């Protein structure tokens, strides 16, 4: 089988060497070297070339190197071309680490203590045990479920919301097209782990923030366009929200001088919450290619109607 990789070249070189050892029947070409394009069955990419299907007339699937597929313009792809996102343990573990860091930081009031440190102010405030901190996870998929399980193990009072019903041990689960008011009203720390779709674009807005408990905090690790940035700033300035940890923005990077760079209640990171880990992802990729060869559905297949 011939596959083409078009993304970060160091990872590509590693996968090429690894596949040559583990699966010599699979030949990985690193863009712009593509071998005989008529033989190429899979393209692994972050951004595919514009003329994808003309270039690769026998393409059987497009694989994303990342956890989402929202970077692809699905409307420009042949409707019957399977699109597959990356699901691999290293990516999941990275997200669990980042969100745990963010929730613990917010739980222990770290944004406030960092501001106090800058002002050389030695002043303690009452703290709460984790069991009294209500955390809400928006999106209970691959990542949301792993994050919720970790937060439960740390003793947080955890709930979650997804489109369709989910059951997770120790987590109060809600479902439906819109986040239920009761779910938002009990989210002292709200985590967004939703994919970017038409229904989640702009979802983190003033109307939603107003339904959170006063003094709530936000962890935004989904995708930038889900957040209305002006509404967040207004919610922070009015005291509706006390802090936000933001890993994804629109655009990325934010322009110089943007309010998020210096806002005292915002922790901003440059879309690093979780990354595809070269070694664990190689094994996940090979397992998926083998599924395809056996005629089985690949893990991470995007439902083109839902958009995720
Ligand atoms: P999944 O597809 O496995 O899970 C998505 C979850 O969101 C599902 O529970 C789904 O509901 C729910 N959902 C989707 N749309 C809606 C909606 N309209 N209303 C309610 N719930 C909805 O995705 P992952 O968990 O793997 O990843 C989630 C997102 O995390 C990615 O799409 C990406 O945007 C982001 N991400 C960010 C990274 C970073 O570094 N910041 C790294 C990796 C991912 P249901 O269960 O019913 O299908």
Image (cartoon, grey):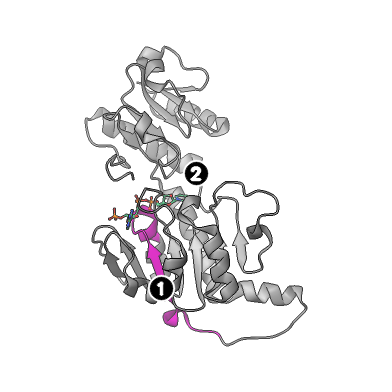
Q: Position of residue 308 (x, y in %)?
A: 34, 45
The span picked out in magenta is 127-146
Label whose residue precedes the other's in the sequence (2 or 1): 1
Q: Which mark is residue 219?
A: none
Left or right position of 111 against 306: right
Q: Position of residue 281 (x, y in %)?
A: 44, 40
Q: Residue 137's image quarter?
A: bottom left
Which element type, helix, strand or loop, lies under badge 2? loop
Q: Position of residue 22 (x, y in %)?
A: 40, 30
Which residue shows up at 50% across the image and 66% down it?
A: 218
Q: Which mark is residue 211?
A: 1
Q: Closer to the camera: disc 2 or disc 1?
A: 1
- Looking at the image, residue 172 lies above or below residue 43: below
- Looking at the image, residue 11 lies above or below residue 112: above
Which residue shows up at 47% across the image and 66% down it?
A: 206
| Residue 268 in view | yes
Label 2 within 8 A of ligand 1 by Cβ = no
Furthest-right residue in this view: 120
Instruction: Using a 10 Å C-alpha cutoff, classify the residue at mark 1 as few (fewer than 14 neighbours), some (14 to 19) or many (20 or more).
Output: some
Q: Considering the image in quadrants, where does the N terminus appear?
A: top left
How many marks the image carries: the answer is: 2
Left or right position of 61 against 214: left
Q: Nearer the viewer, residue 93 or 71?
A: 71
- Looking at the image, residue 235 lies above or below residue 48: below
Q: Is residue 89 magenta?
A: no
Q: CA distance from mark 2 to mark 1?
A: 37 Å
Residue corresponding to mark 2: 277
């Amino acid at each position: 089988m011939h596959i083409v990789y078009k993304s970060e070249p160091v990872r590509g070189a590693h996968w090429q060497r690894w596949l040559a050892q583990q699966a010599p029947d699979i030949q990985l070409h690193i863009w712009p070297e593509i071998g005989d394009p008529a033989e190429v069955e899979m393209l692994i990419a972050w951004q595919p070339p514009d003329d994808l299907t003309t270039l690769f007339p026998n393409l059987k699937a497009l694989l994303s190197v990342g956890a989402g597929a929202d970077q692809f313009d699905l409307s420009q792809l042949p409707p019957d071309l399977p699109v597959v996102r990356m699901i691999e343990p290293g990516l999941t573990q990275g997200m669990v680490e980042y969100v745990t860091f963010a929730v613990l930081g917010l739980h222990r009031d770290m944004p406030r203590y960092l501001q106090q440190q800058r002002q050389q102010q030695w002043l303690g405030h009452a703290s709460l045990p984790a069991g009294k901190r209500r955390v809400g996870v928006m999106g209970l998929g691959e990542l949301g479920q792993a994050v919720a399980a970790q937060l439960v193990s740390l003793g947080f009072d955890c709930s979650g919301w997804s489109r369709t019903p989910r059951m997770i041990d120790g987590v109060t689960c809600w479902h439906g097209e819109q986040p239920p008011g009761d779910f938002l009203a009990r989210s002292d720390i709200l985590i967004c782990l939703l994919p970017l779709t038409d229904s989640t674009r702009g979802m983190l807005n003033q109307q939603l923030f107003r339904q959170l408990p006063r003094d709530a905090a936000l962890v935004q690790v989904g995708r930038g366009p889900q957040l209305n940035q002006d509404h967040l700033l207004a919610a922070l300035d009015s005291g509706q929200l006390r802090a936000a940890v933001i890993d994804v923005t629109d655009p990325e990077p934010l322009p110089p001088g943007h309010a998020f760079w210096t806002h005292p209640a915002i922790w901003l990171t440059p879309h690093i919450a979780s990354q595809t880990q070269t070694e664990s992802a190689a094994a996940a990729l090979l397992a998926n290619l083998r599924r395809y060869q056996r005629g089985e559905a690949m893990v991470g297949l995007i439902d083109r109607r839902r958009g995720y």
